[in-house]
Amino acid sequence: MLGIQEIGSYIPGKRVSNYERTEKFGITADFIDEKIGVKSISVRDPSEESSDLCIKAFNNLAAKIKIKKEDVDVLVVITQNPDFSLPQTSAIVHGKLDMPEKCASFDISLGCSGFVYGLSIIQSFMKENEFRTGLLFTSDPYSKIINPEDKNTSLLFGDAAAVTLISDNPKYITGKFSYGTTGKDYQDLICKDGKLIMNGRSVFNFAAKTVPKDVVCCMKLNNLTLAEVDRFVFHQGSLHIVNTIAKRLELPQEKVVFDAWDYGNTVSSSIPILLENEMNGKDNKIIFISGFGVGLSWASTILIRAK
């Protein structure tokens, strides 16, 4: 039985305050506190590549749990902002960590839905090949592509990375997954000429319309009711998005997690960063997770406490 054993993360120490940019962007403190929910964004050092963020996340994981590198069967990196267009960032991480040659490695090009997709992909790959230990990295530093003069993006996105240890000694196992894509709207969140462009209203409407329906779908797939879920961990697109989804589903506020105040929307890393803490709550027997955004795509599943 494969599942999540532990999670490590890395959030750069540098912060850019959104309160200090209220005049520049014509916004108020209330807008920050009540709408976007991001007081400051985390920003990597220019010398830090996507692979470097992965290494620092791994070091955090290794400080929590002993990992024998010779036992790692597969290493996967989810990123849309790789070190280079080629080779794959997973190969660079593999080399920097001095993993054994027998360790498979590959990248997944997905954004906000990437972690949930990645869980399904790496576990399926491991089951098919009878692997016992895998590392699922998420590292998508958007500071590489953010225009600091763009109000729609520069107030929201922060840099971070996470790594999830998948093993046959799990703390949580996954249930059934639900997925979807509205590819015709891909231009609503797109990188053109090296800069991120986002139609904020369209992305919000997509999330507000699509995610509640997908939550209900995922619940049915897993023969669960919303009341049986202990925690809901949604992608941290913004406070307004998370609150809107919760309101439309009539979820108790205390069950819905938002904690991106100090670092921002970290794309594929947003869910594992939250899970790193949520997994320690022994009362959290069932956790619902959902990622949604770039693509436009979404993916959801449940995590069931195994021990």
Image (tube, rainbow, N blue to C red):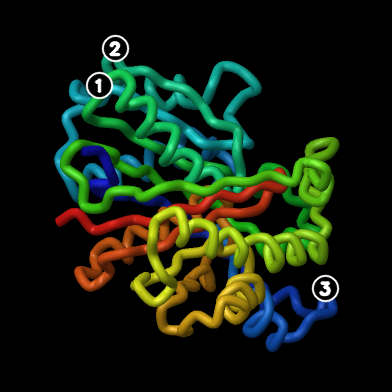
Determine the residue positioned at 41% across, 41% down.
119
Residue assigned mark 3: 25
Residue assigned mark 2: 102
Quarter of the rendering occupied by the N terminus: top left
**Front-lying residue, 97 or 80:** 80
Residue 269 rendering spot, x and y as whole percentages: 49, 51
Q: Which mark is residue 130?
A: 1
Residue at disc 3, secondary structure? helix
Does residue 37 appear in the picture of this structure?
A: no
Determine the residue positioned at 61% across, 74% down.
239
Tell which tag, 3 or 1, sits nearer the viewer: 1
Q: Report whether 57 appears left or right of 13.
A: left
**Front-lying residue, 95 or 235:** 235
Say above or below: 39 vs 79: below
Quarter of the rendering occupied by the C terminus: bottom left
**Identity, as a three-letter code, of the amino acid under mark 1:** Glu
Residue at disc 2, secondary structure? loop
- Quadrant housing residue 124: top left
Determine the residue positioned at 62% across, 36% down.
80
Say above or below: 189 vs 284: above
Residue at disc 1, secondary structure? loop
Say above or below: 149 vs 81: below
Determine the residue positioned at 54% across, 82% down.
250
